[in-house]
Image: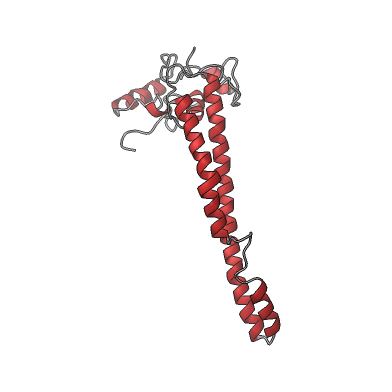
Amino acid sequence: MMSIGIGHQPARTAGLLSGGTDRRDGTAFGRAAQANSFPPVTNLSPATEHGIRHTERMGVDREKPAPEHRRPDGVTDAEVAAAGRVSEALETVERARGHLYGFHQLIGHAHLQLAEAVDMLRAAGHGERADKLMEELVGRNVLAGRWTFQVVEEFDDGYWSEFRDQERAVREELLGGRRHLYEAEMKQHRRTPGRAGHEARPAEQE
């Protein structure tokens, strides 16, 4: 299996390695990606070579991903793609969870606004209408038996926690627990080697 190499500039510029794809469909970057081994860098400009030498003097080879972002031996493109899609699904759930917490806070804010409106109605001489709002809406559950804090707690303790556990289990089984391996290989494929701002990883002190 060939590697995602930092010397593959024409393919990188085109966005694909030979036979590859950007989709998580089992052909991660053209069956490239044994990310723990890289071909030598060739035909680089003097400025690029200077940048690489500077990187080496820093004590960390920033032309290679960190060990936790390198593909373990024997892991296939299909496994990287499948595990990556599960992680992508979890990221979508995390976005949904953010919206759920937004719902929780917005309903809470509306509850406080309503309580203020009740006081204003009563002060304006509409005590009966104020009492009706107080009885029917102030303190009312948004779902059966639940205020929104109970909704988010139930979601967190159930669906969200189970989804996270299952995503972690897939990564452990397929990728040795590595996170964002698909994205790490995409970065290695697309960045410009030796150029400032295109390093594979931060320096030790960063």
Q: Residue 55, relative to residue 73: is it above or below?
A: below
Query: In this orientation, which residue lies closer to the viewer: 4 or 52?
Result: 4
Taking the spot 55% from the left edge, 44% from the top edge, the residue there is 159
Residue furthest toward the top?
A: 1
Query: In this orientation, which residue lies closer to the viewer: 153 or 181?
Result: 153
Residue furthest toward the front?
A: 145
Is residue 121 visible in this depiction of the protein? yes
Total number of numbered discs in the rendering:
0
Taking the spot 63% from the left edge, 61% from the top edge, the residue there is 142
> What percent of the width, then of the height, locates residue 125?
68, 87
Is residue 180 visible in this depiction of the protein? no
Q: Quadrant of residue 92?
A: top right
Q: Residue 18, relative to residue 148: is it above or below?
A: above
Q: Quadrant of the C terminus?
A: top left
> What percent of the width, then of the height, locates residue 99?
59, 51
Taking the spot 52% from the left edge, 49% from the top edge, the residue there is 156
- Rendering colour mode: secondary structure
> What percent of the width, then of the height, locates residue 91?
54, 40
Residue furthest toward the bottom?
A: 125
Query: In this orientation, which residue lies closer to the viewer: 44 or 103?
Result: 103
Q: Quadrant of residue 16?
A: top right
Query: In this orientation, which residue lies closer to the viewer: 119 or 10?
Result: 119
> What percent of the width, then of the height, locates residue 193?
44, 24
Left or right: where 201 falls relative to 137: left
Q: Quadrant of residue 52?
A: top left
